[in-house]
Image (cartoon, rainbow, N blue to C red):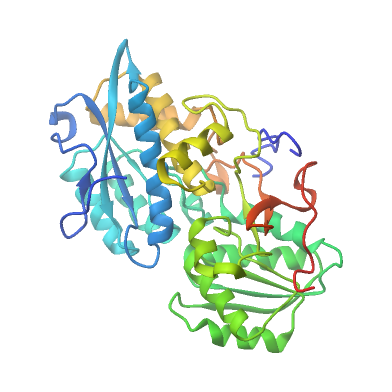
Amino acid sequence: MRDNIKNTVNRRQFTKAAGLTGALGVASVAGCIGGGSDRGGDKFKFGVVTSLSGDLRFGGEVTRRGYDLWKKTINENGGIEVDGSSYEVELTYADAKSDPSTGADAASQMITSEKVDAVLGPYSSNVTLAVAPIMEKNRTPHISGSAESPRIWEEQYKHTFGTVPTVTLIAQQAAEELLALDPSAESVYVSGVNGPFSKATASAMRDAAENKGVEVLAYDLNPADTDWTSVVSSAKSEDPDLHFHGGHIGSHVSLLKAADQLNYDPNGFFCHYGVNTSDFKEGLGGSASGTFGATVWLPSIERTGGKLFGSAADYAKAARDEFDQSPDYTQAASSAAGIVYQQALEELGAAPPLSDSEQSKLVSILEDIEVQTFYGDVTFETEGQFYHNNTTTTPLPVQLQGDDNEAVVVGSSSSASEADYPVSE
């Protein structure tokens, strides 16, 4: 992997838009043009189910930026070319409201009423786990640019794919590298939110500590709306060397605010997802610096390039120009999901709207596809516990340093920065 990270880990081993309307928040960014094989129109119509309100709205907006930037860029480049003709992309959004059942209802309405050709998936694993069976029942292609719970891939849904490696891989490898920092940690406190993604994250962190022979003082899972001062109080009494936390951006911010209030200062905090996002940094103000996290993509890391965006740096510039903020790996992976559809549709060679049989053929193409993107090479596992997950992208442990800019730390790259550790010193 190291300096030029081009997905060198064997995947078997490392095995803006319209306002919301309606009860489910279904809206189109380009106007509704009908539905299904009887829909008519000259655009490929993609449904997007993601959380644009509720406690997962921060991540939901990240996925939205990723999907929107792909749509804008592909349309500016003439659209998707099929048999000598080009077709623009239309996105129709539905708000899952951070609730799995709402997400499932939104997905059903998206397919039956909006008659989409394919679906771009939710932010968060719990909503994805509710949406995936709807995709399966309706035989609709579905790519998530965000969900990371291993449960999704263990279910082996034929019509669901994901561009982000499961958190089982990301969190565990990053945690093991952080545990090797000098001085080596002898104890760790693991907390998390009791949801599919967050629980899997915390579990992978615990496994990493156990693999390294580090004492796990507690494995503390809590509801999303818990009082994190209580958790911090318990952790402080245990006095761990490191504190690992599995959750989304909201719980990270709440936990670290509580730690600041209670003067809880272990040698470091590791909060896997989102530490390099503007929501995390703005949520913590000046106290974000020093936090460890993990990512599978950064603008500064060279990847294979390829379709639509020439490089990671090119993509980051386009994102900053469009949204006035730097992208994180979830936004990047969401845009990459669109690029995967782009190549698959070109290979399919069918004009919109897609028939049922053409959607089935599209799924078969996705299973065997290999796409070079600014995010990295994307391929999907076709068997085993990571079925239809893209596991090719290597985790990078990062830390917010200086002006809260993320830096790759420890042994993940020959150009890695020295970790600020122990952070409390």
**Residue 348: quarter of image:** top left
Residue 124 versus residue 224 in the image, above or below: above
Residue at the farthest top position:
84
Q: Residue at x 17, y 38 (%)?
A: 31
Q: Residue at x 33, y 45 (%)?
A: 136
Q: Position of residue 19 (x, y in %)?
A: 22, 51
- The answer to whether residue 422 shows anywhere in this view is yes
From the viewer's perspective, is 113 left or right of 405?
left
| Residue in the picture at 54% in, 26% down | 310
Q: Residue furthest right?
A: 183
| Residue 72 percent coordinates (x, y) | 35, 33
Residue 143 can be seen in this image:
no
Give the quarter of the image for residue 245: bottom right
Quarter that holds the N terminus: top right
All told, the count of numbered labels is 0
Residue 332 point in image, percent of width and height: 50, 42
- Residue 398 placement, left or right of 254: right
Q: Quadrant of the C terminus?
A: bottom right
* Residue 177 point in image, percent of width and height: 76, 57
Residue at x 46%, y 40% (from the top left corner): 319
The answer to whether residue 8 is above or below residue 107 is above
Q: Is residue 128 above or below residue 182?
A: above
